[in-house]
Image (cartoon, rainbow, N blue to C red):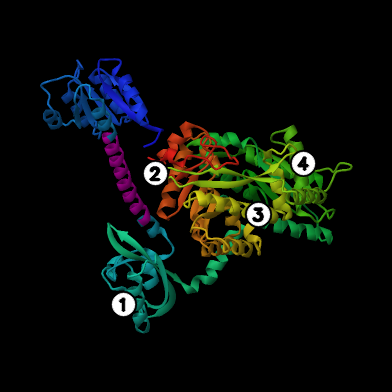
Amino acid sequence: MNSQSTIRLLMISDALDDAEFVTSMMRPAGYAVKAVRAEDREELDAALAKGTVDVVMHSLAAMDLSLSDTIEAIRSHELFVPVIAFGENEDLTVGKALAMGAAERVQPNDQEQMRHAIVRELDRVLVRRQAHWLSTAYRESEQRARALMESSRDAIAYIHDGMHVLANDAYLTLFGYEAFEEVEGMPMIDMVQSEDQAKLKEFLRNYSTSDQAVGTLELALQQANGSHFQAEVEFSRASIEGEACSQIIIRHQGNTEELEKQLNLLSQRDSVTGLFNRQHFMELLQEALTRAEREEGESSLLELALDDFGSVKDRVGILGSDQVIGDIAGVLQDTFGDEDQVARLDGATFAVLTPISDQASLDELADRVRGAIKDHICDVNGTSVGVTATIGIARIDGSTTDPNDILSRAERAWEEALKAGPDAHRIYQPKEGELSQKQIDQQWVERIREVLRNEQLQLLFEPIVGLTGESVPRYEVVFRVLDDNGQPVEDPDMLAAAERTGMSKGLDRWTVLNALKALIEQIKVDDSSVFFVPLSGHAFDDPGLFKWIHDRVSQIDLPDGALVFQLDAGAAANRIKQASAFAKAVHTIGCRICLSGFGHGSDPFQVTRHVSVDYLRVNDEFTHNLQQNTQNQEAIREIAARASEEGKQTICPGVKDAGSLSVLWGLGTDMIQGEFLQEPGTERDYDFSSMAM
C-alpha cells in the first residue's frame, strides 16, 4: 500500500474517540481512514445501505448493539464486510468471536494486533472485490463476444479438438448450411479440399506447439453442395466457457474488390452523419474552384455552425450531441437539392457547395436552411433538443484558386453573422487591403520555419497513470512554442496553419527526434517506461515519415512497446488505407499505435476493424462534467468494455478533479491523465506508484 490508500471504516461504538484513535493509529502506517460511527441498528443499516464500508470495528462496550447483531445486519445486507471485535469482555474469547462470524478478536490495548488485523482484512476485501469484478467482467465479455460474433459479417467459428463447437450465421451461410446443428461436432478438416488437408494438419500441429497468437493459412474450402472456393483462414487462441479452443475467421478472397469499395466509401464519409468528410469536401471544393477559374460556372460555399453547442453537450452528453449532429445532417440533406454537396467539417460545423451564386437566391437559401434547423426538434432519449445555426457564405467566382482562401472568406462571413445573431447569415464582402489566405499562410510558413530553425520549441511531459494496479511510467510527449520570454505556450493557430500548409511534417520530425532522445534517458532510469508521441493529422500521408522513423529507431535498442505513436481518430477514419498501412509498418519496428480523440459516432470502432491499434485515448469531451453526466459515463463504460474485448487499452484524459477520478475508477478504463494528476511539465518526476493498490 502507499500513502494515498484509504480505508472506509464503520465504527460501532458509544465512544466518540474510538474512531479518532484508529485513524491516528493507522496514519503512520500509510493509511488514511474515512470513519463513520453507528450506535444503533438504524444507523448501522443506513451506513451499510450506502455500500461504502471496507471494514467494521465493533466495540464490545457498545450498549445497544451486540457483536451478533452487527454480524447479522451485515449478512442481511448480503455484503462481504469483515468485523473486528475489540475492547474488554472476558466472556468473549477469540474462539467464540470467530464462531459468531467475526474476522478477528483483538485483545485490549494491543495496537499492533489491531493494525495488522485491519490491514489483513482490508486486503481480503480488495482481493474478493477484484475477483468478483473479474468474474463479472469475464461473463459479460463472453456474452458480448457472442453477440458480436453473431452480428459480424465475417464468417467466425470456434474449434475444439478439431471439431466445431460454435459458429455464426455468416459462417453457416458461407458453407451452405442452415443451422448450427448441421455442423456441430463436424471436424473442420471435412470442410477442406482433400489436396489441402495435409497442409491444414501440418499448420495446426505447428500452431498448437508455438507461442504464436495469430496464424493465417490459405485453403481450398468445400461447401455443403460440394463446390469449393479459395479463402484466407485466420486462427487465434480463444476459450469457450473456460475450455481452450481456436477461433477461426474466414475472409472470402472474392470480397477483396467489395472491401476496397467499402474502404473508399468510408474514406469519403463522416462516421457520425454519413455526409462527406472534410478531406473529400476539400477535393470537391478544389474542383469547384477549377471550374470557376475556367469560367465553367460559379458556385458558393456555405459554412454553417450550430449555435452554443457546448450547452447541448452538457445536457445530453457526447453521444447524445452526436445524435443531434446526425439529426441536423438529415435536415440539411432534406433541405438542399441534388446538385448541392453537403459535408461535415468538424464538431458542429458543416459546409455546403451549391451552384447558386446570386445574392438574392443565396439569402433565400440561407433563410430557408436556418428556418428548417430552427423548426426541427431532436429527440435524444426522451429529451427534446432544439438548436439554431449561423451561416457564413463565400462566392466561388474565379478570384482565387486556393480552397483555404475560400474557407477563410466563409469563416469571416460567419464571424460577422455571429455578431448579428445567433441564427443569422452573412455573405462575404472583401475589405480593402485584406490579405488573401494564401498570403496569410505564407506568413505562417515563414514563422514555422523560423521556430524550427531557432529551436523555439520545448518538449513537455504529461503522466498517463494506470488504474489497474501497475505502476508503469507512461508520459504523453507534447511540444510547446517558446514565447518572447522563453516560456512554453500553446499555439493552436500555428498548429492549424502547419496542417494547412504541410509544415506539420517538420514539426512531426522535430517532436519524434527529441522524444527519442528523452526516451533513451528515461529508459536508463526505468526500462519499463512508455512514451506516447502525438503526430499530426497528415502524418501517414507523408511518404518519407515512416522510413525516417525506421532509420532512427533501428539505431537504438528500445524495449518493445516503449514508443507509441498517437494518431487522431478522425484523421485515421478519413484516410483508412493510409492509416492502416502506417500502423502495420509501425508495428514491424516494435512500436505501438494509439488513436486519440476516440469515441464519436454511432460506431467509433469501425476504424479499428481496419487499422491495427493498441490504445484508445477517449475524446476528452467525455470527461467534461463527468460526475453529473450519466450519458458520458455510460459512453466511457461501453468504450472501455468493447476495447477490452478487442485487446486494446483505454486512456481517459482531461481529469480535472477528484470527483471525475472516483467516477472513472468504476467505468473500466485502464489509464487516466489530466491536470488533477499533473499538468504537462519539463520534468518526468511523477510518482506512478501513488495509484497502485
Within 10 Å of disc 3 (Cα), the crowding (few <14, some 14-19, many 20+) is some
Residue at numbered disc 4: 413
| Image label count | 4
Residue 245 vs residue 584: left or right?
left
Separation of marks 4 and 3 at Cα, in angstroms: 33 Å
Residue at numbered disc 2: 469
Q: Is residue 172 above or below residue 280?
A: below
190 or 83, nearer to the observer: 83
Instruction: Tell whether label 3 touches label 4 (CB within 8 Å).
Output: no
Q: Secondary structure at mark 3?
A: helix
Separation of marks 1 and 3 at Cα, in angstroms: 53 Å
Residue at numbered disc 1: 190
Which one is earlier in the sequence, the residue at label 4 or at label 1? 1
Q: Secondary structure at mark 4?
A: helix
Q: Residue at x 51, y 38 (%)?
A: 623
Separation of marks 3 and 2 at Cα, in angstroms: 33 Å
Residue at numbered disc 3: 508
Question: Which amino acid lies under the numbered mark 2 shown in the image of this protein?
Answer: Gly
Q: Position of residue 683 (x, y in %)?
A: 57, 41
